[in-house]
Amino acid sequence: MESIRTRESDRYHFNSLLETLSSNDDVLENMKAAKLVRILTKRFPPLRAFFEEDSVAVTKLLEPLMSGNLIATNPVVIPLLVESLKFGTLETRSNSAAALSSLESNKCIIMKAGALEPSVKLPLLAMKDAAATIVSLGVVKENRSIAVFEGAIKVIMKKISDRILVDELLVLLAMLSSYDKPIEQMVKLDAVSCLLSIIKEDTSDKSKEHCIAILHTLCYNDRTRLQEMWRDESVNGTIANLALNETTRTKRKAKEIVEQIDKYFSGS
């Protein structure tokens, strides 16, 4: 019985803080309320369930952000949005993703708060709201090692394989491919086959450009992957075709891959 009373008391306190956020025009009071909400959700994890149980909760949290009554880039607010991104309903997760995508000036704080993984894991409809956030987070070099540490490569590869937001996620994958650890993970996840299949489809020039950039990195880091490209090339000529018919950057990298293939496998 005591736990029920405590839970009801916590809920009342939590909701009163959200009410303050949604109805108070005093910036300082709003900041205090946001900080308390953050402390409560961090200290008492069960409170995170309120985001899922009550879809109104995140609306109350977002209202001052959207109306300009609360400083959106404040480091207290961002973790709250990430909490709802992780634990909320589909609607609240989508709303939080959209809100985070507008906070361009604080990418490092957003990343450190753990926004990337739940953003990438969103269903397709909600991911459209998160696409800008996902790509913009990867622009900051400091964020890329965090993304790899959080296991982003596996999730991104799965989404690309399922043809979900391919253009956007290929941008992020290309950014991450400049590091050794992601390369190792991509190899284990059969990235070469996946990327070649995307190139063969009627995809955008940008997608082809990012695919060939990643394949270029893979072939120079792993001879076995170059052999895999050679096998496909001997049948389909996929990369050689890009070397003749695509944008300047794509042509250059495709030509270099073909030269590598000829260098090591021309006599095979």
Image (tube, grey):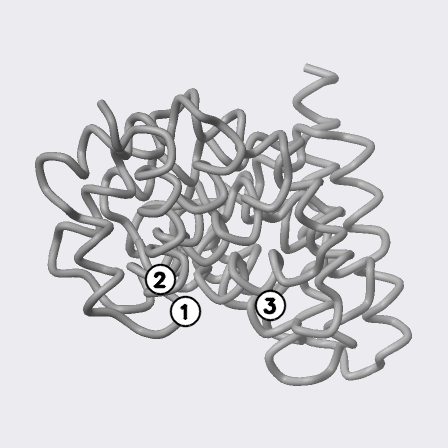
Q: Amino acid at mark 2?
A: Glu
N-terminal-most mark, 1 or 2: 2
Query: The N terminus appears in which quarter of the rendering?
Result: top right
Residue depicted at x 33% and y 37%: 261
Could you say where residue 230 lies in the image, as x and y percent from the top left?
25, 32
Q: Residue furthest top?
A: 1
**Front residue of this view, candidates 195 and 223:** 223
Q: Which residue is mark 1?
A: 249
Residue depicted at x 38% and y 28%: 225
Callout 1: SS: helix
Could you say where residue 33 lies in the image, as x and y percent from the top left?
82, 61
Instruction: Please give left or right for residue 58 compared with residue 248 in the image.
Output: right
Q: Amino acid at mark 1?
A: Arg
N-terminal-most mark, 1 or 3: 3
**Front residue of this view, candidates 14 and 79:** 79
Callout 2: SS: helix
In the rendering, which numbered label is found on residue 209?
A: 2
Residue 35 position (above or below residue 105)? above
Task: Say whether residue 126 is visible.
Answer: no
Q: Which residue is mark 3?
A: 62
Residue 39 position (above or below residue 202)? above
Q: Measure the alpha-carbon separation of dots 1 and 2.
A: 7 Å
Q: Measure the alpha-carbon separation of dots 1 and 3.
A: 42 Å
Residue depicted at x 25% and y 69%: 246
Q: Quadrant of residue 189?
A: top left
N-terminal-most mark, 3 or 2: 3
In the rendering, which numbered label is found on residue 145?
A: none
